[in-house]
Amino acid sequence: MNNKTKVFTLFALTLLPSLALAQDELSGANTAWILTSTALVLFMTLPGLSLFYAGLVRTKNVLSVLMQCFSVAVVISLLWLVVGYSIAFGPSESAYWGGLSKMFFNGVVVESMTGDIPETVFASFQMTFAIITPALVVGAFVERIKFSSMLIFSVLWTLIVYFPVANWVWGGGWLGQLGLIDFAGGTVVHITAGVAALVFAIVLGPRDGFLKTPMMPHNLTMSFTGAGMLWVGWFGFNAGSALAADGAAGMAMLVTHLSAATGALTWMVIEWRKYGKASGLGAITGMVAGLATITPASGSVGPAGALIIGLTGGVICYICTNYIKQKLRVDDSLDVFPVHGVGGIVGTFLAAILVSDSLGIFSGNGYAQGMTMGSQLGVQILGIVVVAVYTAVLTYWLIKLVGIMTNGIRVTKDEEQIGLDITDHDEQGYSM
Amino acid sequence: MKLISAIIKPFKSDDVRQALSEVGVNGVTLTEVKGFGRQKGHTELYRGAEYVIDFLPKIKLEVAVSDNIAEQVIEAICSAANTGQIGDGKIFVTNLEQTIRIRTGETGDDAL
């Protein structure tokens, strides 16, 4: 079979979108909800995650972190236009990428449809996921990365890691075909971001004075504000991933909320017992852990299942956070891997169990036809391992490449001491 | 004239200001400072990372007074700022050579 003819035919068809793609009647309700979800997920990055991260660094680097998250949103949006949407969701026959036929949104017009919502709405919604994923990685290299290196890395990483993985899982690619359960991005978003963060932190090395001098969060009120925005925005992230305003979206929202609350409480209780006090930073970190963990499973589990997910995610992420920083002494500065990466892994794994409809009160929606707990677990583990290894290998080589392109990825020791706000941007966050 | 500097606990600053007014002090300079003495610091914990904070926040009050009320002022500060706990602070008294009111050029006790 000549694939070229096929691709050409598809390409030609995309030029006639009203004929080729308008399979379904437009649903106003679904469209309205995905428009809303798109705004909610963008709000998670701007300013939710940005504030959450900015509060956790020192005063001299607050603007640099805000700027890193903001500029990721800027460049990834344009990358999405140029080639991202096409690679992730293009119509190619390949199970590994979507091809280049939708570069520059070729053929996407007002009437184009994805299911029963406009393609423009679907593409915008997915764009906000592509934005937040490299923005999450920022937490690994704050306070010591060159702005130029960070920007080039984010673009190339999203291009060769995020877009293909999004295609494998959501764009009709091979992991989706195998039946991988990843409703809203446990593998696509959290494992890719978490693993990239870990690799980056190891290659880049710790901040000057790491574990010797205090590097305290400079403004936890800022982090609390951002954390609240993340919690709310996550409703769009998970419930929006139903791509409809229906019962699945409602259940996704409910289990997302319950897991966030459980994760926060879990972290508080652990700290309370261990140190005698429940810290604010602990509570919001546990919340993020609960949210990251429920993400892949949010379309599969029931409310009581969400309790188990939040609890497990909270405990395991807590242990990993302490282990990686204090024992392994890896300066994944804002704990991206132990919270997002580990949360994504735990959630993707647990989804295979808690989706079962024979667990009594803890039952989920039931397995897809032909799937059992064993086979589902196999697919989930395969998905976790492949995505993690693919991300780790490409991230490593990409850091090396960017190092050559920008003559080193790290600022000088002097610049690090002065702070990136001044050295990278000639600005100060606070004039006091 | 004496220059009286007092390092006190931050939450005692209103009480001390009240006590100073009662003994006839007309002006005080207040600065937020950090330091350590016998109280030492405390520890803070962020995601399991423990940091020892050596310098604790304190308030420094500076009062310039004429010799005849200096003792009263010192007593007022002592009693208002005292909690009986370690870390209540210290008072330093130095001789003050000259005081000038910028607006009028008055000097000495007249300028206080």
Image: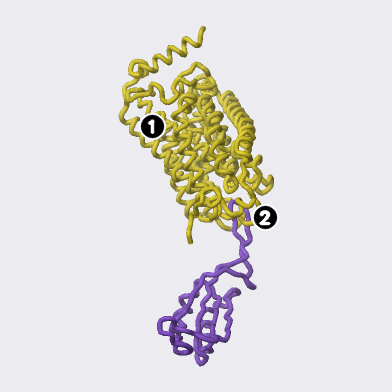
Chain colours: A yellow, B purple
Judged left or right of residue B70, residue A115 is left
Mark sitting earlier along the chain (1/2) = 2
Q: Which mark is residue A289?
A: none
Query: Does residue A268 show up?
Result: no
Pointer 2: residues within 10 angstroms few (<14), some, or many (20+)?
Answer: few
Splitting the image into 4 quarters, where does residue B52 fall? bottom right
- Up-down: is A22 above or below A52? above
Circle 1: residue type:
Gly
Does residue A413 show up?
Answer: yes
From the viewer's side, name the closer residue of B16 and B104: B104
Quadrant in the picture for residue B91: bottom right
Instruction: From the image, tell me which residue sits under label 1.
Output: A247
| Measured Cα–Cα span from mark 1 to mark 2 | 51 Å
Q: Measured along the vertical axis of the image, is residue B76 above or below residue A273? A: below
Q: Position of residue A74 (x, y in %)?
A: 45, 38
Judged from this view, the residue extending furthest toward the bottom is B68
Q: What SS does tag 2 mark?
A: loop
Q: Position of residue A114 (x, y in %)?
A: 39, 24
Residue A338 shown left or right of residue B28 in the figure = right
Which chain is disc 2 placed on? A
Q: Secondary structure at mark 1?
A: helix
Residue highlighted by disc 2: A212
Q: Report the side of A301 relative to A203 (left or right).
A: left
Residue at (55, 68) in percent of width and height: B57
